[in-house]
Image (cartoon, grey):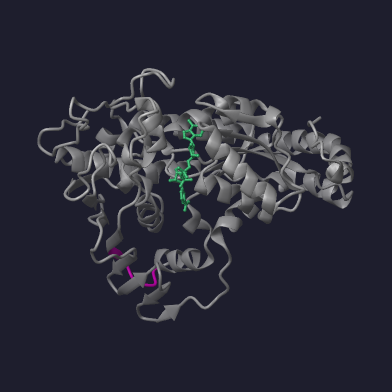
Amino acid sequence: MKRLHSQAANHGQNQAARRVGASRRDFLRTTGMAAAIGMGGLSLARAVHAAGEDPILEIALIGCGGRGTGAAANAMDADPRTRLTAMADAFEDRLNSSLAALKEKYPDRVDVTPETSFVGLDAYVKAIQSDVDVVLLCEPPHFRPIHLRAAVEAGKHIFCEKPVAVDAPGYRSVLESTEMAQQKGLSLVSGLCWRYHNATRETVKRIQDGAIGDIVTIQETYNTGHIGGRPRDPELTEMQFQIRNWYCFTWLSGDHNVEQHIHSLDKALWVMHDEPPAAAWGLGGRQVRTEMPRFGNIYDHHAVCYEYANRVRVYSYCRQQANCWNDTTDHVFGTKGLGVILNEFRVEGPEKWQYQGENTNMYVAEHQALFQSIRSGQPINNGVYMARSTMMAIMGRMATYTGERITWEQATQSEENLSPSSYEWNATPPIVPDAEGRYPVAMPGITKFV
Ligand SMILES: NC(=O)c1ccc[n+]([C@@H]2O[C@H](COP(=O)([O-])OP(=O)(O)OC[C@H]3O[C@@H](n4cnc5c(N)ncnc54)[C@H](O)[C@@H]3O)[C@@H](O)[C@H]2O)c1
């Protein structure tokens, strides 16, 4: 049984929540078991619906920044019978500001108390182990494989933001967790939100169904201005500074071609029926974002050619430099025409087509799918594609950092591990600044593939 909010105003509602608590546990045990053994979760869930006992599902948020706060709101908008009951963040101020914003918007559905607010690098364990049904993983990408494993081991359903790893050991771990989630009948929904966007789904389906003939080339762009770059606060340890400024450190974000451009690469992977490319080579560097330590060690541009075994090429470009021409689009060229996914959702081929349907909020849609899957006892598992598109992006970074042509096999078997030796505020991060405060930046032709 959950601890309940102390405010008198919420007393009646919490009594109601308490009453459904027993059926909630029974429901989840029953549908989870049925789904795991593959025999009739749906009918059991329907029986619960029929009895009018749709249980309250309780949520823990891990990583209470911009996206985490948004994801918690999306989850509550997606399913009226959900409550946020636990939160975890590395930093107390981030948790507090997120909690205040969510409480203001959902005063009766946020029941996070000091006992269920967890701060620090081990906060995720406590949030996962609290009596919740669903965990939202919205922390920086480095931590995702570890937190995902803990959530699956604890038997929680999961919403998992992108990207899901920063290195190949993380990718392999996510695949293992994906398999484990499958065996346990848990839902694992990815934050690769375009997969839940109506117009994108319909455009990709038409391309896959042959509307532009056979695919020849895909062009993916994510060219924007600067992102990230917090000044150093002398009060912080090096580990605290880097985690505060996670976007700018490869070991935490994966670099921007992984953290951001993954949305584009995931669409290319999707169009290619989730088959990974055979190899990648590319160019990249750090031309204008040179201010240290503010911009850590990530590049400011990457251009990668992904080669498929059937000769399809994916040309991918991402740039974060101010005052340049910006473009974020996906163009798919086929033997009979062109498909434009973002932002036009159209196909030019033997038949012209443009998406005319309704467009729902993809950020809410992914949570609707998650909660419906839990309630129906029919788990969703997006683990394989979220791991593959992450690995595709990591492979591109391996190519731009080293200047080498890297095969999928090499990339996925890489032993490069970007983890620190321990997760403590006084521990040494995987990279440290030199005497002048400069971080080592990868150099093509010098940096080696590991
Ligand atoms: N799907 C999308 O469209 C989308 C959009 C934005 C961000 N994202 C993803 O969401 C994730 C978070 O991005 P954001 O923009 O919210 O960043 P953010 O910096 O606003 O939030 C990250 C939060 O995680 C906390 N944190 C850091 N280390 C932690 C740890 N070990 N345990 C718990 N909390 C920790 C930080 O203190 C911070 O509050 C990233 O992976 C990002 O790629 C996805």
Q: Is residue 369 left or right of residue 438?
A: right
Residue 403 to residue 121: above or below = below
The C terminus, quarter of image: top left
Question: Residue at coordinates 19% horizontally, 50% vertically from top-left?
Answer: 288
Furthest residue toward front? 234
Q: In the image as oriented, which residue stretches furthest toward the left?
A: 445
Residue 302 picture location, percent across and down: 22, 50
Relative vertical location of residue 294 with respect to residue 361 in this rendering, above or below: above
- How many numbered marks are there? 0
Task: Answer left or right for 415 relative to 403.
Answer: right
* Residue 177 relative to residue 155: left or right: left
- Give residue 365's quadrant in the image: bottom right
Residue drawn at x 32%, y 66% as measured from the top left: 332
In percent of width and height, residue 42 lies at 74, 47
**Residue 62 can be seen, yes or no:** no
Q: What segment carries the magenta color?
A: 210-216
Q: Main secondary structure of the magenta part?
A: loop
**172 or 127, which lies in front?**
127
Residue 206 lies in quadrant: bottom left
Q: Is residue 255 above or below residue 345?
A: above
Residue 105 showing in the rendered view: yes
Say which quadrant the N terminus sits in: top right
- Viewer-proximal residue among 124 and 399: 124
Residue 354 at what x, y percent from top left? Answer: 45, 78
Q: Residue 142 at what x, y percent from top left?
A: 41, 33
Which residue is rendered at x = 80% and y = 38% of the image? 24
Q: Nearer the viewer, residue 42 or 250?
A: 250
| In the image, residue 248 lies in the stretch drawn in magenta | no
Q: Quadrant of residue 130?
A: top right
